[in-house]
Amino acid sequence: MTNRIDPFTRTPGIAGEAYIDNKVADEIIANFTSDISSKYVYKITGLRGSGKSVEYGKVIRTLKADEKWLVYPLSAAGDVVKTLISKLSMESFIDSKSKVTEVSSSVSASGDAFFISGKGDVSIGKKESDNEHFYSDEAALSKMIATANKKKYKVLVAVDDISKTPEMVKLLSMIGSMILEGMQIYLLVTGLSENIEEFSSEKNLTFFKRADSIEIKALNKYDITAMYQKLLKVDAMEAKKIEEETKGYAYAYQVLGSLYFGKAKEETIDDLIPEYERILFRDSYDLVWKSLSKGEKEVIRCICRSKDGKAENIKNLMKNKSTYPVYRSRLLNKHIVDDEERGYLKIRLPRFERFVEIWGNE
């Protein structure tokens, strides 16, 4: 008898058998591949661990499998412009070579040569080599994209977990210019809202600021319950009990599903919670907490101490209640809290109150 393989995963960008489709990737693919859509840029935002990279990966894999597309995922670090040029130059239809003349004093020079009469004979050979400096990066990239389009290819440039660097600003500016020229070049990025908003101050990136932004929200509780029933072979009530511990947080859904899948027969959900917390705290919440300002952390602490999340109670616990609207807005924008119930702020992350209780003063 072979052991069953764990259907859950914590690998970024991969959801595997446990994938719950929220249709985000489908919307992007439909618009990018449509002959009538005018959408060339999409930004996928959301909390760390919300599943941004999973949707990003689905778009990448789907379009890579389409022979009409050239897809170039780029690392957010490094010189992204030169990397894109290098990747494009590897395509067979791109001629990135230019003829240069090399003068040699040897009559045995290889290749085509002709001779000039005079006091001495000099051979002149033509050598093919890379011309690295003749064109600017923008001119070279624009020419390559135009060539790809003439060959009936659409080009997708993709960046996961984008952040603002001079090189990234340069790349986005070039892509915006090419889109305005009518080239078929598309852009897909994922990132935290605050990282994406940093590009808003760049005057020449208006196209990026105005582009469609899709927030990855909590997974549907009915979908999670149904998937737990299917993959964990449990009844509806047990699946619902597991689901309630996740609050729809995609990373928590995968972590708890994996722990339950591997648990001993006599173990219960309660037995799994310490390990569940350890993984969430270490791999997700530590980064979330470190990304918050002092004022944002204070509001989070006050939400936890208020117990019910009522706005008035939160304000009364703050040192300076007049700053509440500012930090409330920031935390909403970072997808850490929600205000679905009027007059209340609730933390969206499972067991985050416990993290704040233990580690919130660091």
Image (cartoon, rainbow, N blue to C red):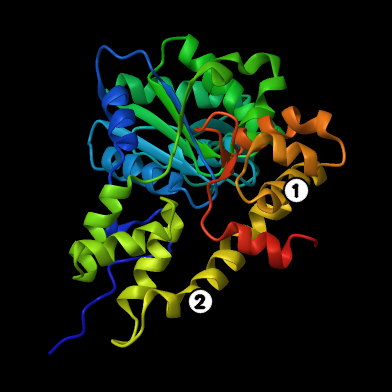
Classify mark 2: residues with Cα within 10 Å, few (<14), some (14-19) or many (20+): few
Q: Residue furthest right?
A: 319
Q: Residue at x 45, y 43 (%)?
A: 73
Closer to the camera in the image, 131 or 37:
37
Q: Secondary structure at mark 2?
A: helix
Amino acid type, residue under disc 1 in the picture? Lys
Number of numbered labels in the structure image: 2
The residue lying at 72 percent from left, 21 percent from top is 201
Quarter of the image with the C terminus in it: bottom right
Check the image and report above or below for 234 versus 168: below
Residue highlighted by disc 1: 297
Which residue is painted at 30% across and 22% down in the image? 31
* Rendered residue at 18%/70% (across/down): 233
In the displayed structure image, the side of residue 18 where residue 289 appears, left or right: right
Q: Secondary structure at mark 1?
A: helix
- Which mark sits nearer the N-terminus, 2 or 1? 2
- Image spot of residue 268 (x, y percent): 36, 79
Q: What amino acid is found at the position of numbered circle 2 in the picture?
A: Glu
Q: Which residue is mark 2?
A: 275
